[in-house]
Amino acid sequence: MTSLFVSEQRPQDDAEIDQLLDLTFGIARRTKTSYRLREGNVAAKALSLTVREEGFGIAGSISFWPLLIGEAQTPAILLGPLAVHPEKQSRGIGKILLQESLSRAQEMRHKLVLLIGDAPYYLRAGFTYVPTGQIDMPGPVDPTRLLYLELVAGAMSAAYGLALPPFRWRDINALRAATSH
Ligand SMILES: CC(C)(COP(=O)(O)OP(=O)(O)OC[C@H]1O[C@@H](n2cnc3c(N)ncnc32)[C@H](O)[C@@H]1OP(=O)(O)O)[C@@H](O)C(=O)NCCC(=O)NCCS
């Protein structure tokens, strides 16, 4: 049995993680709406993890990104990408990454997790479909792939409207303040 090590992503892991993501999702991944929510955003460091396998390198990775939703600017975190190297899939690495990161998120008092991904995989981990029209994204999203998980019961009821990275809402708020007089 080979040893697996879970650790926080480090800047020096970026190139290896990028290669892993190109391998699992293809290079067209960068055109997806979820990337609009990541560009210019800063990953949630303590939640963005890798699994290393002895003698192999990074076998899987997961990242999270802060978001604010709607005019109420309700905080949430966007899960993704979650990727496991094709040679290492179906050995529980995805499950380890999900369980460890979500348990950390709960400890850190995050309340709500969103993701755009394969429902059959994430429904098994406790995620649910976002009700149609409740959350808008800055690009097209297949509603059957837009999912959420409450880390605090009822958190989803405060999340209505457009999801954007915090810096985009700061820009919007500043523009509104500047044009309101
Ligand atoms: C999806 C992914 C992260 C799962 O990680 P993993 O380490 O392979 O998964 P686990 O070992 O934790 O779980 C394996 C189980 O998930 C199932 N599974 C894997 N990918 C799935 C998918 N896209 N949809 C539904 N079920 C899936 C497997 O069939 C397996 O089922 P079983 O336990 O009944 O045999 C990984 O397979 C991956 O990176 N895939 C390529 C990218 C991708 O398709 N991502 C889709 C999510 S956005």
Image (tube, rainbow, N blue to C red):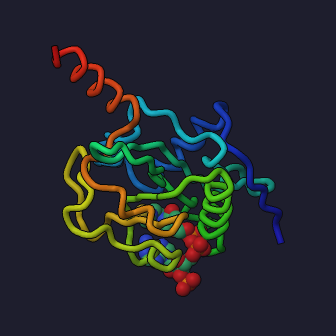
Q: In the picture, which quadrant includes the N terminus?
A: bottom right
Which residue: 41% across, 59% down?
115
Reply above or below: 159 against 129: above
Residue nearest the viewer, comparing 120 with 162: 162
On the image, the x and y values in percent for residue 142 come to 23, 63
Which residue: 48% across, 54% down?
79
Query: Which quadrant of the structure image shows residue 165?
Result: top left
Q: In the picture, which quadrant includes the C terminus?
A: top left
On the image, the x and y values in percent for residue 107 come to 68, 56
On the image, the x and y values in percent for residue 57 come to 71, 49
Residue nearest the viewer, comparing 129 with 94: 129
Query: Which quadrant of the structure image shows residue 157?
Result: bottom left
Residue nearest the viewer, comparing 101 with 87: 101
Reply above or below: 143 against 49: below
On the image, the x and y values in percent for residue 12 come to 67, 31
Number of numbered discs: 0
107 sits to left or right of 129: right
